[in-house]
Structures are given as structure tokens and as C-alpha cells.
Amino acid sequence: MAKLSSLKIEVLSFLLRAARWRPLHPLSAFFFRHMNTFLPVDRLAENQHWLAFHHPQPDYPLHILILPKQSVQTIEDVCAQPPEFTQDFYQIVATLIANFALTTQGYRLINNGGPNQLVPQWHWHLISEHQQEEND
């Protein structure tokens, strides 16, 4: 089981690194449009518009990526999304905060854009300095 999890992390890490190369942007956009099928991760939370999973290369004790299921490359592209898109985002964040008891531990919600966005897909990082097991 640990070997399969390690392979998933390696595949995802490779895909994220490959997405940084400009000639592969159309391929990575296709991937993100269809990531519900392709993404090799253990899902922590999911709804119609969003997917959350542990970061494959975490920088914090708790580091969760939250990505839209469709291709949304910049924050400017969000304006074209239906209102449910934003509502679903806050719903999934609230679910993660509750599941990991982050209200008492503390957390940060980070969004990078432009040159700080290493992957051509708009996404969020939910991080905490405190590693917390998911409550079921």
C-alpha cells in the first residue's frame, strides 16, 4: 500500500513539474479538465467543482492542495465560472478545516498567481504548522 502511495506521489510530482514547461501547457490544461479521471491522489475532500488532496511535496506539516476540476488558469478566469464554483470552494475549505481540527490549531489559505504560480492551473494551498490527522 505504501509503495502504491509513493508511486502516486511520484507521478503527480512529475506531472506538476512537466506542467511548468510552456510547450506542455495545452496538455496540462487537458489534464486539469479531466483530472477527476487521471489524478493519482487520495482525495481528502471533493465536490462538483473542487478536489483536495495532500501536497505531493509538502512544505509544511499539513499541506493540502485544493484545485478546481476544470481548467482555470488564472484568478481572472474565475469571473466566467458560475456562482456555485466559489460557493463550493468555501464549502470544501470549511470541510477541510473541520476534518483536520484547524480552527484550534491555526491555518493559512494561500493562492499564488502570475510568475509565482508554478503550475498553469489556479489552485490554493491550505497549510498548518501543526500536523493533524483527519477526523472521520
Image (cartoon, rainbow, N blue to C red):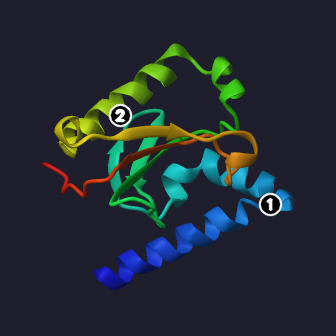
Per the image, label 2 sits on a secondary structure element best described as: helix
Going by the numbered disc 1, the residue's amino acid type is Leu
Residue at the extreme top: 83
Quadrant the N terminus occupies: bottom left
Q: Which residue is mark 1?
A: 24
Write down the quadrant of residue 82 in the picture.
top right
Q: Where does residue 57 sit, x and y in percent of width and height?
A: 48, 67
Residue under the point 63% across and 45% down: 33
Question: The residue tagged with tag 1: helix, strand or loop?
Answer: helix
Measured in 3D between alpha carbons, the distance from the residue under mark 1 to the one under mark 2, in whole angstroms, is: 30 Å
Among numbered discs 1 and 2, the one appearing first in the sequence: 1
| Residue 91 pos. (x, y %) | 34, 27
Q: Is residue 44 left or right of residue 113?
A: left
Name the residue at 31% across, 53% down.
129
Q: Give the numbered dot on residue 93.
A: 2
Most extreme residue toward the right, as rendered? 23
Q: Which dot, 1 or 2, sits closer to the camera?
A: 2
